[in-house]
Amino acid sequence: MREEFQAELTELSRLLVTMAEGVRAAMRKATSALLKADRDAAELVVERDVEINHLYRQVEQKVCDIIARQAPVASDLRAVVAALHISADLERMGDLAEHVAKTSLRRHPSPAVPAELRPVFKQMSEVADRMAEKITGVLAEPSVEGAKELETEDDIMDDLERALFKVLLSDDWPYGAETAIDGALLGRFYERYADHAVNSGQQVIYLITGEPVG
């Protein structure tokens, strides 16, 4: 029974790593679509969000099966519950990448963001990509130190969002309210993507230490 349980935990971990890889790829492609007005890339992100949702349902089902058949306790139960929380955060990260892609599609064939905003979104996407890479790593090889690094990256993302709003709210903003609203929403998508990565990292810390974080 113990060997079977460990095999199921290994499968849960594999599913989470696959989800993390998927949401990283989704946001990279969504950003490319956003900055290059690439309709094909944006549509691919939207189509593939179904795959991330399917992985999430697989994690949910496996967690239910493990609890029903194995009745885990203590650290074993912690591992199962953490997996469920992490999968929910990863699923939401996939949704946020989809939102970026849909914003690009809504403005196509025009670029969704003016040239003045592209540098900050490029920086936000680079932070998001580093965070997705880090969460993939700590899911594959759990590490308190690696998980804590996500909070530093999140601080950088928050600074970038503040810089974005400073531009959008400046008196000499030339593009009108609609473009400003799009910019603000896009900034929020990246910021929330980072927040969910941090949440996932906190679950990894909880799994390792048994101490709630946040």
Image (cartoon, rainbow, N blue to C red):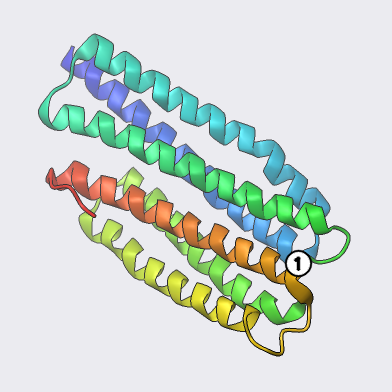
Name the one closer to the observer, 9 or 91: 91
Residue at the image position 64 percent from the left and 78 percent from the top: 168
Q: Amino acid at mark 1?
A: Glu
Residue 180, how many percent across, how many down?
A: 69, 71
Name the one closer to the observer, 179 or 20: 179
Say few, some or many: other residues with alpha carbon within 10 Å of mark 1 (under 14 / 14 to 19 / 20 or more): few
Residue 46: quadrant of the picture: top right
Give the answer, above or below, for where 141 lies relative to 103: above
Residue at the image position 23 percent from the left and 24 percent from the top: 6
Residue 17: quadrant of the picture: top left
Give the answer, above or below, for where 181 lies relative to 209: below
Residue 110, how many percent across, how many down?
A: 86, 65
Residue at the image position 31 percent from the left and 52 percent from the top: 201
- According to the picture, the residue beneath numbered tag 1 turns out to be 178
Residue situated furthest bottom in the rendering: 172
Residue 43: quadrant of the picture: top right
Give the answer, above or below, for where 14 lies relative to 93: above
Residue 91, how many percent across, how many down?
A: 49, 39
Residue 23, how many percent across, how many down?
A: 54, 47
Residue at the image position 88 percent from the left and 60 percent from the top: 109
Q: Secondary structure at mark 1?
A: helix
The C terminus, quarter of image: bottom left
The reply, left or right, for residue 133 in relation to residue 48 is left
Name the one closer to the observer, 35 or 162: 162
The reply, left or right, for residue 22 in relation to residue 2 is right
